């Protein structure tokens, strides 16, 4: 797909043709269904002999405009919008897998994805091997000639693990031709890495996060080549989940996307300053950030990511101190989710990753002393001052 402009231009203009009446902003087509000119036309549309809208679960012009922009940003042929990130992930996996299939997944995933892969899919007869995919030898040993799908996150939640997409995709395709490599690109966004260009087959997103960026929408995407996209839309979206994104939400994401480049640049710059503070804070034992040379995947992160992102995790000296620090935040907001203008702070072991057992938490490389931080767009000095006062308050007996 050739596009002559840069990323900041892309998120604003996309490549959608002018709207019929010349509206600058995307019109919101708030309709469930579309009127046919004749019974014959309705029949032709259902038979796929004529293009045009039928019913908003099958497609809607506001949503289509958004899907085109996301496909352009990820460099994919097709994008399917869902009403949540989990809708996109379950709709994608369930439409492409069947009983008897084998999949390989990383052990550090968003908690609900982890539950879907490690508990729900096996109930439907899908065999899942879950392991640390940044261990290349272990990953290669887990792959089988009949492995149907490989799943991981670009920057893994919450330990900020970075897996070599190119190496995983080329090995998976060599050992198991036809194996689909699926990457959740929520944390990095297509502005930091484009997994399809590195050999992945499908990119999924929680658009609830950076892509929308304003904490007012829950949404998801799946981006893939056309033939896979057709299956995801016609099976995973239309029949299995029915998790359709509404036109109002599509409009809000189109609006939020216009500032994605400036938001990511600001967030990534703030994150570097916050990391610098955390590194020297006596109350912090360990900082997890892919831009730190001591991070185990620093070399991969340097090669793969344009910037190191806005997500940081850090371990306090004790669970008690971690809890107290969370309760003493004045500016940073105690809430799950991420990628908003507000700095959001949460406790993975008891919140987003509470479905992990103690052993699974250890295997994924974190603990109940870990705090996850989604750096926002406030003044970096204000974020740092808030952390400092909360850490000091947490130390008081
Ligand atoms: C990396 C990642 N993927 C997927 C999801 C699920 O997205 P949603 O909450 O939009 O369903 C989340 C949610 O936090 C996430 O962090």
Image: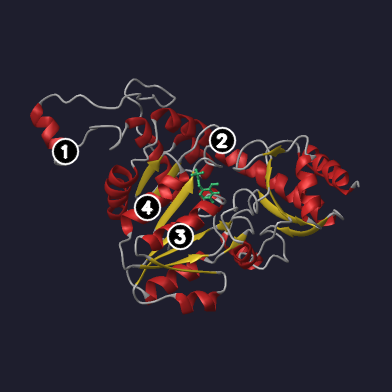
Q: Residue 119 carries which label?
A: 3
Mark found first going from the N terminus, 4 or 1: 1
The alpha-carbon separation of the residues under discs 1 and 2 comes to 37 Å
Q: What element carries label 1?
A: helix
230 lies above or below 121? above
Residue 375 visible in rendering: no
Compare residues 227 and 116 and report the one nearer the observer: 116
Residue 313 image point, x, y percent: 69, 54
Q: What element carries label 3?
A: helix
The alpha-carbon separation of the residues under discs 4 and 1 comes to 23 Å
The alpha-carbon separation of the residues under discs 2 and 3 comes to 38 Å
Q: Residue 46 carries which label?
A: 1
Q: Residue 92 carries which label?
A: 4
User: Which residue lies at the image location 37% right of the left edge and 52% below the top edge?
Assistant: 92
Callout 4–callout 2 Cβ contact below 8 Å: no
- Residue annotated with mark 2: 259
């Amino acid at each position: 797909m050739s596009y002559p402009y840069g990323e900041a231009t892309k998120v604003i203009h996309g490549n959608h043709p002018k709207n019929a009446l010349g509206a600058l902003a995307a019109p919101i087509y708030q309709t469930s269904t579309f009127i046919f000119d004749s019974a014959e036309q309705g029949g032709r549309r259902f038979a796929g002999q004529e293009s045009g809208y039928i019913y908003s679960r099958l497609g809607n012009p506001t949503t289509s405009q958004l899907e085109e922009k996301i496909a352009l940003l990820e460099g994919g042929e097709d994008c399917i919008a869902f009403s949540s990130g989990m809708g996109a992930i379950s709709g994608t996996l369930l439409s492409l897998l069947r009983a008897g299939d084998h999949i390989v997944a990383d052990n550090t995933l968003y908690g609900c994805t982890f539950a879907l892969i490690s508990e729900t899919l096996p109930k439907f007869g899908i065999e899942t091997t879950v392991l640390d995919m940044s261990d290349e030898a272990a990953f290669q040993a887990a792959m089988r000639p009949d492995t149907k799908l490989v799943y991981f996150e670009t920057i893994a939640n919450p330990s900020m693990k970075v897996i070599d997409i190119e190496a995983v995709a080329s090995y998976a395709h060599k050992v198991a031709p036809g194996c689909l490599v699926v990457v959740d690109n929520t944390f990095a966004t297509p502005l930091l890495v484009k997994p399809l260009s590195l050999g992945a087959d499908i990119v999924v997103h929680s658009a609830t996060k950076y892509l929308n960026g304003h904490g007012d929408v829950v949404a998801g995407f799946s981006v893939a080549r056309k033939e896979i996209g057709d299956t995801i839309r016609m099976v995973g979206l239309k029949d299995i989940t029915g998790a359709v994104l509404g036109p109002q939400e599509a409009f809000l994401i189109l609006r939020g996307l216009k500032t994605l480049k400036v938001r990511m640049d600001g967030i990534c710059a703030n994150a570097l300053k916050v990391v610098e503070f955390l590194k020297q804070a006596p109350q912090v034992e360990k900082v997890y950030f892919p831009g730190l040379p001591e991070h185990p995947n620093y070399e991969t992160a340097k090669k793969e990511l344009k910037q190191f992102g806005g997500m940081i995790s850090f371990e306090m000296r004790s669970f008690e101190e971690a809890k107290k620090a969370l309760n003493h935040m004045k500016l940073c907001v105690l809430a799950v989710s991420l990628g908003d203008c507000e700095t959001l702070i949460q406790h993975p072991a008891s919140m987003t990753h509470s479905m992990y057992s103690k052993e699974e938490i250890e295997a994924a490389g974190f603990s109940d002393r870990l705090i996850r931080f989604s750096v926002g767009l406030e003044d970096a000095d204000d974020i740092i001052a808030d952390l400092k006062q909360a850490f000091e308050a947490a130390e008081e007996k």
